[in-house]
Amino acid sequence: MTKKKLTYNEAVSEIEEILQQIENEELQVDELSDKVKRVNTLIKSCKDKLHKTELEVEKILNDIEEQK
């Protein structure tokens, strides 16, 4: 079974939810490590998406500039 890829906004929402759980001390000690690992994975995914988007936008802007 393949996992659905999260959108950037879904990932950010999940990060915020986990951080709120940590801040409100809603997590058991046993869950904390897994949640921190999940946040790390989500942050890496967000950074990757932002970097790819930046490259795409730069390419589009360069293409527009070349057409002038």
Image (spheres, rainbow, N blue to C red):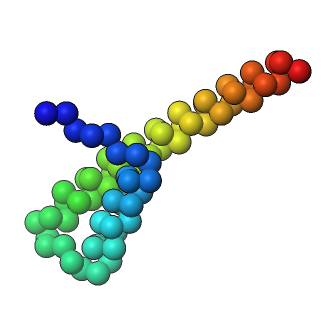
Q: Quadrant of the N terminus?
A: top left
x, y percent for residue 34: 19, 57
Name the residue rendered at 30%, 66% in the picture.
18
Please identify the quarter of the rendering in which residue 45 is found. Answer: top left
Q: Is residue 50 visible?
A: yes
- Give percent across and percent down for residue 16: 38, 65
Residue at horizontal 61%, vertical 36%?
Answer: 54
Whether residue 44 is visible here, answered yes or no, is no
Task: Please state the total of marks drawn on the protein image.
Answer: 0
Q: Is residue 13 above or below residue 24?
A: above
Q: Find the residue positioned furthest to the bottom.
A: 24
Residue at point 19%, 33% (across, down): 2
Residue for point 47% across, 44% down: 47
In the displayed structure image, the side of residue 65 where residue 59 appears, left or right: left
* Front one among 36 and 48: 48
Q: Position of residue 11 (x, y in %)?
A: 38, 52
